[in-house]
Image: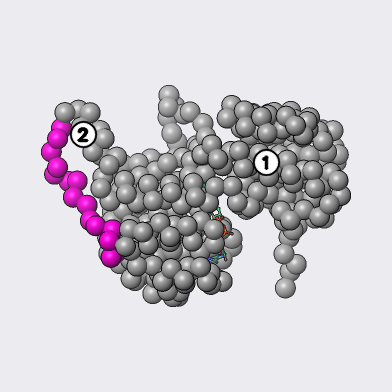
Amino acid sequence: MKVAVFSTKVYDRQFLSTVNSPTQHELVFFEPRLNRDTAILAAGFPAVCVFVHDQVDAPTLKLLASRGTRLVVLRCAGFNNVDLQAAADLGITVVRVPAYSPYGVAEHAVGLILSLNRKIHRAYNRVREGNFSLDGLLGFNLHERTVGIVGTGKIGLILGQIMKGFGCNLLAYDVYRNPELEALGGKYVELPELFANSDIISLHCPLTPETHHLINAEAIEQIKPGVMLINTSRGALIDTQAVIEGLKSGKIGYLGVDVYEQESELFFEDLSGEIIQDDIFQRLTTFPNVLITGHQAFFTAEALHNIAETTFANIADVENGRPCANEIRAQPSA
Ligand code: NAD
């Protein structure tokens, strides 16, 4: 199939081209993101392949459909950037990669936890400058601390398994219970109880209207003072302004994020010579107890390989008229 592949970097091209070689789809790589302005690039392509920051909204889908596109292939799990109802109305099939590196993302969350706790990000700079003072680097043992996991699907469960290995107690909140987490000794509680009793809170649920700003001023009121908050899921799970207030007051003791609500303006680009206009983001970077990575939790060789494999398997299913297990559809309205 002829596929217009948007938002591609060198590493995407490398993995997609290598995995495509036996399947021989006709891939045309575009660096820009897909949106209303760039949809014209996909004219005549039956399929477009997109990632987390492409804007697959109704106007973009209409433009795509009018020029022959019938398939949107997501190279990611989250699909909050796709208007599924508009796609269904236009007869466009949407497929995704539901899991490509749950271990990679969970391990990155643990990396943020350990770095923040033991101040490794600060120690790295100090030692390079010949400052071997330990002042300000005091950490705490993870052993017997309580980790609250919000969203106990693939990534949340693996985080639970790893943290159990550190000797942590596990609290969990999800709309569905995961028996594997319960088998680890994880206890499902309502959110206020999780907020009140967790030393570390890690977010692993999808971004939906229900989870938007799950961590807001009201939630921060309920958390244990000095909590460590980790978000490797989606930026808008957190009300960043409220979290900044929480950091200023000391209610939030540590913040580790791989995602940010307005990240599409920043992440995946080298802006090192430019003036960042986002004052909220810039304020976040001034806190010594905040560690930000630019949506790299998924970024392992295994994940890029899995993304490419599942992407081509999805395309093959649709091309050959087979049911595709990774198709996503709009939820029928209640
Ligand atoms: P998953 O579907 O396996 O698990 C998500 C869990 O969240 C499910 O158990 C679901 O029941 C639960 N959930 C849904 N609505 C909820 C709600 N309102 N409150 C609490 N829990 C709720 O997904 P996953 O593979 O574990 O991925 C989790 C999230 O991680 C994805 O949605 C995605 O946004 C994010 N992600 C980030 C990266 C990265 O690089 N930073 C990479 C992959 C995925």
In the picture, the quarter occupied by the C terminus is: bottom right
**Looking at the image, residue 187 lies above or below residue 322:** below
Q: CA distance from mark 1 to mark 2?
A: 42 Å
x and y, in percent, of residue 195 in the image? 38, 68
Residue toward you, 12 or 273: 12
**Residue located at (62% from left, 32% from top):** 15
| Mark 1 crowdedness (10 Å alpha carbons): few <14, some 14-19, many ≥20 | some
x and y, in percent, of residue 29 in the image? 69, 28
Q: Is residue 300 magenta?
A: no
Q: Is residue 172 visible?
A: no
Residue toward you, 288 or 182: 182
Q: Is residue 28 visible?
A: yes
Tell me which segment is drawn in magenta: 131-145
- Nearer to us: label 1 or label 2: 1
**Residue located at (22% from left, 52% from top):** 139
Amino acid at circle 2: Arg
Q: Which mark is residue 126?
A: 2
Image colouring: one colour
Q: Which mark is residue 17?
A: none
Judged from the image, the quadrant occupied by ligand 1 is bottom right
x and y, in percent, of residue 281 in the image? 41, 43
Q: Secondary structure at mark 2?
A: helix
Q: Which mark is residue 309?
A: 1
Q: Is residue 34 left or right of residue 183?
A: right
